[in-house]
Image (cartoon, rainbow, N blue to C red):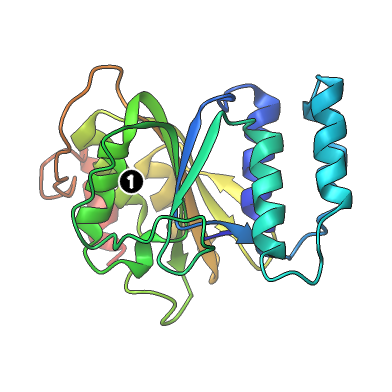
Amino acid sequence: MAISHLSYMLYRDARRAGWLPTGGRILEFGEANWYNDIEAAVLLKDIDSFIQDEALKEELTGRFQNLDTNGPAYLFDIARLFYDIIFQPSERQAIDLNGTPDAMQLDLNEPIDLGRQFDICINNGTAEHVFDIGNFFRTMHDCTAPGGIMFHEAPMTGWLDHGFYNFQPTFFFDLAAANDYQIIGLFVCDLSNISVAPLTSRKSAHQMAQRLELPDNANLFAALKKPMEERGFKTPRQGYYDGRLDAEEAEAWNNLR
């Protein structure tokens, strides 16, 4: 629900690396605002870096300069500007019971059928607040077009009573395995030290834990690509109980309890 310093860095670096899609339709699960742990002025540099069209560059710069710092939607306006710079979307929609009047007032605990799909679906810290977590991820799957990308940011450690759930790496590995998602990136985000560590496999997550390198206050950030062929959502089974872990991974699973 917020663009923090770390999520800003991850989206920006994905754009720099050339794999973040632009020009598509965006659906936010939880309307993002600006977390305000980084100066909004960084967006002026991003406009120069990422926007080639001079008319669009002028328009976005003007929007930044005209932001109403005292307005009730100020932090939401910064987040919208960020998305327009980084993703340059053709359309941006949001589902949020507590967002701005522009958001669709829908309960993500309930089945939702928007009758259409989006190229990019974003969960910047909403899933943990939805009690029916299975329905949340099923809805996000259904709303993502074939070949589309789903971004997730979710609490991993710390965050006492922040929401109903904290997430483990196995959640995203098993979600991807069940639904044939490509894991474009999975990262542990250290919120205290503002740093990011990639998880390239289950083993890398286990090794971080064994070396006592997991932060006390951390999020997981995942970028998952849906297959090009449309298929219904499949509820994951945990890899350990499904027999998909090798001997080393299974041993670590037992030893890290």
Which residue is the extreme one toward the left?
Answer: 242
Q: How many other residues sit within 10 Å of disc 1, few (<14), some (14-19) or many (≥20)?
A: many
Vertical placement of 229 versus 197: above or below?
A: above
Relative depth, front residue between 221 and 207:
221
| Above or below, 43 relative to 126 | above
Residue lying at 48% horizontally and 75% vertically, measured from the top left: 159
Rendered position, 222 above or below 132:
above
Q: Is residue 127 left or right of residue 46?
A: left
Identity of the residue drawn at 66% across and 25% down: 17
Residue ranking furthest to the front: 101
Residue linked to disc 1: 172
Question: Looking at the picture, how far across and down is residue 70, in whole percent?
Answer: 80, 72
Residue 244, x across and y down, in percent: 17, 38
Please tell me how many numbered marks the rendered image carries.
1
Amino acid carrying label 1: it is Phe
Q: Quadrant location of residue 45?
A: top right
Left or right: where 71 falls relative to 208? right
Extreme residue in the bottom direction: 161
| Residue ID at (11%, 50%) | 241
On the image, the x and y values in percent for residue 121 come to 43, 40
| Residue 214 in sight from this viewpoint | no
Q: Nearer the viewer, residue 226 or 220?
A: 226
